[in-house]
Structure formats: C-alpha cells, structure tokens
C-alpha cells in the first residue's frame, strides 16, 4: 500500500471485497444479467493469482432498482460519482449520474464489499463506457468460467486497462497476452491504436509479439 492508497482509505474507509464466488450466491435469483470485470476477469482467464483492491460487479444501468431489491436488505448502496457520495434509498433512489459507481457495505462501521459499475445499454445491447460507438451483444464481450460466473472477455478488459496502464495492468497484459488468440490480439491491438495511438506504452509489445 502506497501513500495514495493510505490517503484514499483515510477518507473513504476500508475495503474488504467479496470474491466472485462469494457474490454469486448473493446474486442468485437476480434476473437481469450481471458480470465481473477488472482484475478478477483477467485472473479468471489467466489462472494467475493477483491482489484485488475491490470487486467490480457490473449491471446495466436500467437494472439498479432490481439490484436494490436483491441486495438492499443486506447492504447499504451508495452512489459514487467522482468521489461524491450519496446513499441510494427510498428517499433518493436515483444515482448521482447514470454512469456512476455504486459502492456496497453493510453499514457505516463496515468495510466496502462491492463496487458495482452501471453499464450503458442500447436496445438491450452492451455499450462501452469508454466509447459509446462500441456496442455488442453481451454474449460477445463476456464469457462464463468454470466457476459459473460471467466475466468480461480478456481482450475487452485489457482495452479498458490500457487507459491507465498501471503496473498491475502491465502485469495483467504480460500474463494474458500469450493466451490470447489472433482475433483477440487483433482486437486489442486495433483498439489501442485507435484510442491511444502508437505512442502508447503497450504498443511495442502488442506488435512485437503478434
């Protein structure tokens, strides 16, 4: 944990994230689709264990009321929009922003357990939060692992991670790249080139090995 992490926790409180296999039974009976992104999605694909600061659960933004009905009896839901928080309850059921995050914890004395990301949709299809011109059927950008949990596909997860390319993201690329097929590599290479250009720190790796 670095100084930035310590300052963050001092302001917003501790995290003790659930794992994908722990959230799965809590979501049992939840009819809308849900899936896991971020580091857990890459770990599920590569099989390489890594540390996780949180659990990134994703639902479509139109399904927030259903999530409240599913988990609201167990957790308080807080809308987090750029570090501004507001509880989501009967008096204030709407999030601060349609694309905000929703953090879950049992009460004010408890650590945060889940970071729920609200994902846009268009005519029932998945739409990228980073590029609203990129839409697809959910089945084409997610997959179901042996643990029964649906995860974002590795090439899409890595394209999201390319935006910050932190050390942990670089490590995820190192572990996932050899396992990607040519279609997945081409998707990631093209996405990085279009969004960030050939000056991106990953570009040499993406072209040298493929």
Image: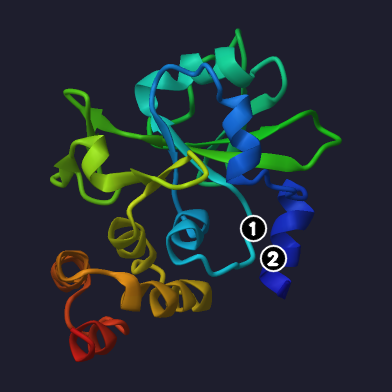
Task: State whether residue 125 is above or below residue 29.
Answer: below
Q: Nearer the viewer, mark 2 or mark 1?
A: 1
Residue contact at pointers 2 and 1, CB within 8 angstroms: yes
96 or 108, which is in the foreground? 108
Residue in the picture at 70% in, 15% down = 73
Name of the residue lying farthest toward the right = 109
Q: Judge by depth and name the residue closer to the eye, 187 or 12.
A: 187
The location of residue 78, given as percent across then percent down, is 62, 30
Q: What residue sits 36% from the left and 20% below the top?
A: 62
**Residue 3 seen anywhere in this rendered image of the structure:** yes
64 left or right of 203 in image: right
* x, y percent for residue 171: 48, 78
Q: Position of residue 129 (x, y in %)?
A: 30, 45
Looking at the image, is 37 positioned above or below residue 50? above
Considering the numbered disc 1 on the image, is that residue within a helix, a strand or a loop? loop
- Toward the front, the furthest residue is 146
Q: Secondary structure at mark 2?
A: helix
First in residue order: circle 2 vs circle 1: 2
Q: Is residue 92 visible?
A: no
Report which residue position mark 2 lands on: 5
Figure quadrant of the N terminus: bottom right
Q: Which mark is residue 53?
A: 1
Task: Depth check: give the residue in front, 167 or 185.
Answer: 185
Residue at 33% over, 72% down: 179
């Amino acid at each position: 944990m670095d100084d930035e992490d310590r300052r963050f926790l001092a302001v917003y409180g501790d995290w003790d994230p659930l794992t994908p296999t722990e959230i799965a039974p809590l979501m049992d009976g939840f009819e809308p689709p849900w899936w896991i992104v971020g580091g857990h999605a890459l770990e599920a694909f590569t099989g390489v264990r890594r540390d996780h600061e949180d659990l990134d659960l994703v639902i479509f933004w139109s399904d927030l009321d259903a999530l409240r009905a599913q988990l609201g009896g167990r957790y308080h839901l807080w809308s987090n929009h750029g570090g501004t928080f507001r509880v989501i309850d009967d008096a204030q059921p709407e999030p601060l922003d349609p694309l905000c995050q929703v953090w879950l914890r049992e009460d004010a004395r408890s650590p945060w357990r889940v970071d729920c990301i609200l994902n846009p949709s268009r005519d029932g299809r998945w739409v990228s939060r980073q590029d609203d011109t990129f839409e697809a059927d959910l089945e084409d950008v997610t997959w179901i692992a042996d643990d029964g949990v649906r995860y974002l596909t590795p090439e899409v997860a890595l394209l999201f991670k390319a935006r910050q390319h932190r050390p942990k993201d670089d490590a995820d690329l190192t572990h996932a790249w050899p396992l990607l097929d040519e279609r997945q590599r081409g998707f990631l290479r093209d996405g990085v080139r279009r969004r960030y250009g050939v000056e991106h720190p990953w570009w040499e790796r993406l072209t040298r090995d493929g």
